[in-house]
Amino acid sequence: MSSKLSTFICQNCGSETSQYFGRCLNCNSWNSIVEEIKSKRSNYQEIKNSKKSISFNEISSKKISRFTSGFMEFDRVLGGGIVPGSVVLLGGEPGIGKSTIVLQSAGKISLNEKVLYITAEESLEQVKIRWERLNQNSIDLKIFAETNLSLIIEEIKRLNPNFAIIDSIQAIHNHEMQSAPGSVSQVRACSSELQNLAKENNIALLIIGHVTKDGALAGPKTLEHLVDTVINFEGDNISSHRLLRSIKNRFGSTFEIGIFEMLDEGLREIKNPSSIFTNKENISGVTTTITNEGTRPLAVDIQALVNKTFYSNPRRTTTGISINRLHQILAVIEKHVGIKLSEFDCYIATGGGFEINDPSSDLGVAISILSSLKNIPPLTSCTFIGELGLSGQVRKSNNLRTKIEEAVRLGIKNIVVPKLEEELNNNFQNLINIKEISNIKEAVDYSLSV
């Protein structure tokens, strides 16, 4: 015996209620609640569990085996390669290149592994057109165009691939559910079944997902908790550079990034990204800092333009740097350097629009602002690393050793950093000129002296 149970689910956040509301009580979005029908069984069969809890000493240690995605940058973001039985969620803006990178990777993987590419948004002919444009080669790559979850699962079981791709999860539907494809319940149910199938058969599964207008992955948050790895593919329509960034990774470090360039023949990985975010010219208003993204140090230029304002309130604009961070740095400069900036507009931009979240870039931002204001180029071949405290002191940075090593590798001659441990200073003193400072005033006197 079964009966129908009606529930109301918000298509924005996935919260459930027993009655309809015009506005979701959880996320406050209007007209996002949709009625969905669930089947309710009156009799439940008792499930006997033969498993029992064990201690850590009883668990056998097993090394994680991986196979390459075909891209070193992709492997870096995944933590060293693709883990059999893992589920990866890849999200990004429309037209950013999600299908392109996945198809290129599938072609490279198929040279050594059995691969199934499931396209739910395009026909086989459309996929072939892209394949020919990318000029790829494959040995064991199969393409399957289908949106019905049951047929997709049957094909995966029949082929039993080592690697399967779903493009995209929002286009897949379970015919046993009455809701439309792409709804919260459909995405959750389809993802759950595919995840169980991947784990049971030790199949590496990559799921492509859409993003909302705010840039967040569409669908319920449970989808991100369900998978092993969440990756965002970032970029814009103007720049040819693309960033692959891990948000969650059970098999590697989070916030690791891989950098690609979009060309006519597809995506090309950039193995020395510091070269695209820096400029060798020594001009006023431009400094270089080294930031850490995951385990990778990156040299990035910080550009500043400071002009006398023509407005009642000076303008503050940033690209790649938090606007609140800029306001704090300007306040520190006024207080501890004694330069009044309330009469000047201030514009800050990073090289290539690269987004910097590392607070060790504070010192580079401050020096670039003062360099532009005084129209004095900073010290030649110099990089600035340090977090600015509210009292004007320059605080220590995380992963300082790897940042100094990157500066040495790039051939930078001078580096301005907070006070170092004696051992760290001795290791690099013959490779690069290290200037240790304790506050913002010392940094200004050293780097902007004429």
Image (spheres, grey):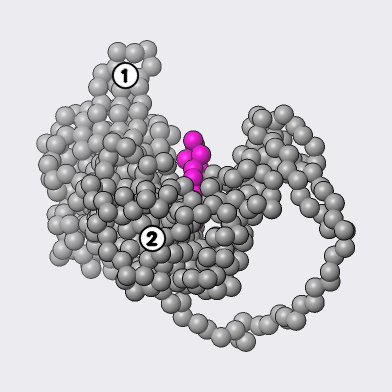
Q: Are marks 1 and 2 in contact (CB under 8 Å)?
A: no
Distance in Å between CA atoms under marks 1 and 2: 44 Å
> Which residue is denoted by mark 2 in the rendering?
77
Q: Which residue is mark 1?
A: 343
Residue 326: percent from the left, percent from the top? 37, 34
Q: Does residue 230 appear in this view?
A: no
Q: Secondary structure at mark 1?
A: loop
Which segment is the magenta one?
Answer: 207-217
Q: Secondary structure at mark 2?
A: helix
Residue in the image at 75% along x and 32% along y = 21
Q: Residue at x 56, y 86 (%)?
A: 60
Q: For residue 36, which quarter of the picture?
A: top right
For the C terminus, the image quarter is top left
Residue 429: quarter of image: bottom left
Type of amino acid under label 1: Glu
State which quadrant residue 96 falls in. top left
Q: Nearer the viewer, residue 21 or 311?
A: 21
Point out which mark residue 389 bears: none
Q: Nearer the viewer, residue 140 or 333?
A: 140
